Amino acid sequence: MLIKTLPGWALPESAATPESLFVNRRRLIMGLAAGSMLAGAAPVLASLARAEDDPNAGLYPAPRNARYVLDRELTSEDDATTYNNFYEFGTHKKVWKAAQKLPIRPWEVVIDGMVEKPITIEADELIARMPLEERLYRHRCVEAWSMAVPWTGFPLSALVDFARPLGGAKYLTMRTFQNPDVARGQGQSWYPWPYTEGLTIAEATNELALIVTGIYGKPLPKQNGAPLRLAVPWKYGFKSVKSIVRFEFTETRPSTFWEEIAPDEYGFWANVNPEVTHPRWSQATEKVLGTGESVPTLLFNGYGEYVADLYDGLADQRLYA
Ligand code: MTE
């Protein structure tokens, strides 16, 4: 496992995007976007989406939600955007250049399965309709490195409301694009592409579950999973599926990417727990991206107060790997 050990140049938390300055501008833009859609101007967004220019660029930086605080310094933008896991573009950490080949406009998102009415929507239009905010979150990779970043996004619960799932839906499955012409890793047929992840509906509607559209007060770079990726900070990072094209509501639990590859090492639940050892390494500590400092890993990555009760009555499940 590669861990980058650079000198400590992480930004202090206070250096991330300021909270209130941009609220009014953003509200104005959101109001205009909502208004023009009501006036039947959705095709304008659709045609803008044909270019690589982001019609939602004016929504960043979004107002910060002060509820989510960090116990550590923010990782530098340079580190968080140049040390990545994105197997579609390679199994090493320097995939950021290769990921630039991914075309993200247009980007159709399908919301289907057990819903009142399946929807196909352009990602830019979906983002314009959702309540964007900035949150400072920790991220703990199963490989025992971690970072702390200012994501911009919207609560996954807002997408669940928008989707109107049927009463019998128990899981939300999320899938990455499939395009081996640009994502050379997808030419490796022994991996079960497309990358698939899933949550229970209770997890998906937990307040922490975020669909990320930006980072460091800007639209999300491709290597971090543009245009839409998940952030579930109480779980190991592999649950946070990138570049999502489909949200499917199901009654049965999906088979997920890493679970299919190595079920003994990577399960469905994958909640962070320092006491449950990975078959090949300890999870007791983590290396902080950028500084290389080793710090203790926390149960649920420190988010137990928000999520521990999701797992009441599930002690028979392999919750922590
Ligand atoms: N999503 C897809 N589609 N492909 C991937 O390889 N890697 C996962 C997750 N989401 C991955 C993915 C893993 S293992 C981690 S730790 C995080 O993305 C890394 O996110 P980052 O590169 O933004 O830090």
Image (tube, rainbow, N blue to C red):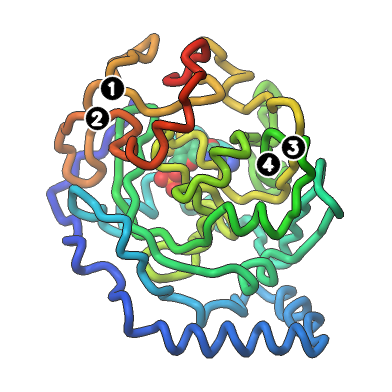
The answer to which of marks 4 and 1 sits earlier in the sequence is: 4
116 and 71: which is toward the camera: 116
Left or right of 216? Residue 29 is: right
Mark 2, residue position = 297
Mark 1, residue position = 274
Task: Name the disc covering residue 169, or none.
Answer: 3
Instruction: Verify CB contact (< 8 Å) between mark 3 and mark 2.
Output: no
Report how far apart the C-alphas of labels 4 and 2 lie in the structure: 28 Å
Label 1, secondary structure: give it.
Answer: loop
Within 8 Å of ligand 1, the CB of disc 2?
Answer: no
Left or right of 17? Residue 259 is: right
The answer to which of marks 1 and 2 sits earlier in the sequence is: 1
Label 4, secondary structure: give it.
Answer: strand
* Disc 3: CA contacts within 10 A as few (<14), some (14-19) or many (>=20): some
Q: Position of residue 299 (x, y in %)?
A: 30, 28
Please state the total of marks drawn on the protein image. Answer: 4
Instruction: Verify CB contact (< 8 Å) between mark 4 and mark 1.
Output: no
The answer to which of marks 1 and 3 sits earlier in the sequence is: 3
Report how far apart the C-alphas of labels 1 and 3 lie in the structure: 32 Å
Q: Position of residue 181 (x, y in %)?
A: 72, 46
Q: Position of residue 1 (x, y in %)?
A: 34, 25
Report how far apart the C-alphas of labels 4 and 1 lie in the structure: 28 Å
75 and 50: which is toward the camera: 75
Within 8 Å of ligand 1, the CB of disc 3?
Answer: no
Instruction: Verify CB contact (< 8 Å) between mark 4 and mark 2.
Output: no
